[in-house]
């Protein structure tokens, strides 16, 4: 990693991993401190206003009490991971989400180079709200990545009336996860080729076989092996993340950022494909989890169809 980016740790606790750096800090504060036009791309899975990751909600989840987290039952001896109850957010909480992501988008605009892309995880319930707020902040909405994966969200019979309405589900069973794609606008009258020349940004990297990067990716639920390494409630599989990370730097050079690092899975994916990444995490528990998990996740050989994206 370039010395310039090593210096981005400022006075925060930090640690290096190969070409990457992790920092314990609030991402809004950190993004505001780094120089303008510093980073080339971003791949992240936000906690949606951080309500479900406030200390009281994390304590409830850890104790099995739920809170805003839905603690699903176990099936066939398999314990399911907790899921945030996005459907319980009221109008005031949704308004707070809108304000948070509008302000977040403004700070991301400051940090990104022109033409830099943002890959942002969401869900079918909140994506419209979140994506609109980020677009209003000034980032160009460039479409969705549809991660085809069957989740445990939705498909339930009406609560406390399961037998009476056994042929009804309150909402469809989730079978996909939308990831918003955003881009910092190019400078006026600048073509993509000009942006690539000046900023190494502007487009997406093609797949290793030369085919275009596609907006539908058939995925798996995160394997037990990876969950054993990194016990985080929203852990995404390396087989999926490495494809997004690879596409995020069109020339395969530069630096990406995950401002909501969690267990460090994006940083691990970047290390696996030979990129540089900065991960920023507010909570010390997850920062320490990432410090342990990143080298282990990065070593996993997970992509048979993407041999260039797995460590040798």
Image (cartoon, helix red, strand yellow):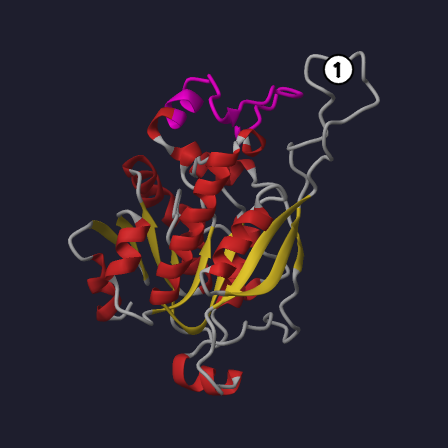
Magenta: main secondary structure: loop
Q: Is residue 230 above or below residue 4?
A: above
Q: Residue at x 28, y 38 (%)?
A: 284
Label 1: few (<14), some (14–19) or many (≥20) C-alpha neighbours in 10 Å: few
Is residue 68 rendered magenta in the image?
Answer: yes
Residue 6 image offset from top left, x and y in percent: 23, 63
Q: Is 37 placed left or right of 237 in the picture? A: left
Work out whether residue 124 can be spotted: yes
Query: In the rendered view of the protein, which quadrant contains the N terminus?
Result: bottom left
Q: Residue at x 81, y 18 (%)?
A: 166
Is residue 275 rendered magenta in the image?
Answer: no
Residue 262 falls in which quadrant of the image?
Answer: top left
Residue on which disc 1 sits: 162
Give the magenta-colored segment's residue range.
57-84
Q: Is 151 placed left or right of 226 in the picture? A: right
Who is closer to the viewer here, 76 or 285? 285
Q: Is residue 263 above or below residue 58?
A: below
């Amino acid at each position: 990693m370039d010395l310039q980016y090593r210096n981005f740790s400022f006075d925060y606790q930090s640690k290096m991993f190969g070409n990457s750096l992790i920092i314990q800090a609030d991402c809004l504060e950190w993004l505001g401190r780094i120089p303008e036009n510093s980073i080339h791309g971003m791949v992240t899975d936000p906690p949606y206003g951080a309500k479900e990751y406030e200390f009281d909600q994390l304590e409830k989840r850890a104790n099995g009490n739920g809170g805003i987290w839905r603690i699903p039952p176990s099936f066939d001896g398999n314990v399911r991971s907790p899921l945030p109850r996005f459907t319980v957010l009221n109008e005031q909480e949704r308004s707070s989400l809108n304000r948070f992501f509008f302000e977040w988008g403004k700070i991301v605009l400051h940090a990104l180079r022109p033409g830099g892309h943002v890959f942002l995880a969401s869900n079918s319930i909140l994506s419209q709200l979140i994506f609109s707020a980020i677009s209003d902040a000034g980032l160009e909405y460039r479409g969705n990545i549809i991660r085809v994966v069957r989740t445990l969200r939705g498909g339930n019979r009406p609560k406390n009336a399961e037998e009476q309405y056994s042929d009804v589900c309150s909402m469809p069973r989730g079978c996909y996860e939308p990831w918003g794609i955003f881009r910092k606008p190019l400078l006026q009258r600048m073509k993509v080729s000009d942006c690539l020349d000046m900023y190494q940004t502007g487009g997406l990297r093609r797949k290793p076989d030369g085919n275009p990067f596609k907006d539908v990716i058939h995925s798996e639920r995160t394997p037990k092996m990876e969950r054993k390494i990194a016990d985080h409630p929203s852990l995404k599989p390396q087989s999926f993340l490495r494809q997004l990370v690879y596409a995020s730097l069109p020339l395969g050079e530069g630096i990406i950022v995950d401002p909501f690092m969690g267990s460090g899975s994006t940083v691990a994916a970047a290390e696996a494909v030979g990129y540089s990444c900065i991960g920023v995490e507010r909570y010390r528990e997850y920062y320490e989890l990432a410090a342990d998990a990143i080298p282990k996740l990065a070593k996993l050989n997970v992509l048979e169809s993407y041999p260039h994206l797995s460590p040798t």
